Amino acid sequence: MIKEPSLDTLLKDSDKAFESLYCAYKDDFLAFAKTFSLKDEDITDIYQEAFLSFYENLLNGKIKEFTSSIKTYVFSIGKFKIYEYLRTNSKLKVIDTPINAEITIDDLSLDNEVLTEREQLVKTKFKKLGKQCQLILELFYFKGKTLKDIKDIENYDNTHVVKSQKSRCLRKLKQLVNA
């Protein structure tokens, strides 16, 4: 792991610092992106776009401080650019309208014989989550709501709050399942 430069260093000595970061994270990103079955040249283009977005966000003042590592930030941008690429090239289907907008975890009356042991465990542990976590996960995964929809429905301040809450809820569910 390389020592990441500070925000000031990136702004003052940007060319050298950015080149160093670009080279340091490239191989890891390429390996990560190959899991999406993309061509090498597409992966390289996406990495360059992600790094360019990071650079522009820094210069435009959108980044005031780092709340994660620079690598995590760049990979996050890259992951969304991969999804965008897959969507625009019809390799990723996004369902805008759920099949049944009223479905909840309780409505899943699947016989326990039909569910695998792992699925039964997930269903049981899901019910141990707090009501807010259950609601967010149901809205997102079962009802197909977007983060913006959930923000509007539940009166959150912004979609970042919803995204963070959903992430915490998923992490909690994984901890319960793996405990």
Image (cartoon, rainbow, N blue to C red):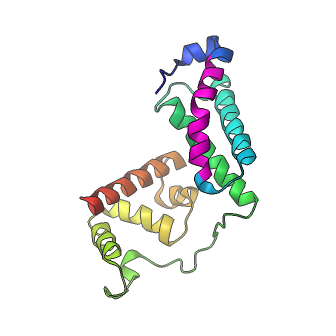
The total of numbered circles placed on residues is: 0
**Which residue is most to the left?**
179
**Compared with residue 127, is residue 36 higher up or lower down, i.e. above or below?**
above
Magenta residue check for 59 = no
Q: Which of the image's four quarters has the C terminus?
A: bottom left
Q: Which residues are magenta?
A: 17-34
Task: Using the rendered view, name the quadrant where residue 120 is placed.
Answer: bottom left
Residue name at image x 69 percent, y 45 percent: 43
Q: Is residue 139 above or below residue 36?
A: below
- In front here: 77 or 169? 77
Query: Can residue 93 be seen in this snapshot?
Result: yes
Q: Position of residue 118 (x, y in %)?
A: 33, 72
Q: Residue at x 46, y 27 (%)?
A: 1
Pick the residue in front: 104 or 24: 24
Q: Answer whether residue 77 is visible to the viewer in this image.
A: no
Q: Is residue 23 found inside the magenta-colored segment of the image?
A: yes
Q: Measured from the top left, where is residue 168 in percent x and y?
A: 38, 51
Rendering coords of residue 148 (x, y %): 57, 56
**Which of 134/110 is in front?**
110
**Left or right of 93 in this view: 2:** left
Dividing the picture into quarters, in which one does residue 132 lie?
Answer: bottom left
In the image, residue 140 lies at what x, y percent? 50, 64
In this view, the residue in front, 125 or 143, is 125
- Identify the residue shown where x is 61% and y is 29%: 62
Q: Is residue 51 left or right of residue 141?
A: right
Specify the principal SS of the magenta part: helix
**Image height check: is 11 above or below 101?**
above
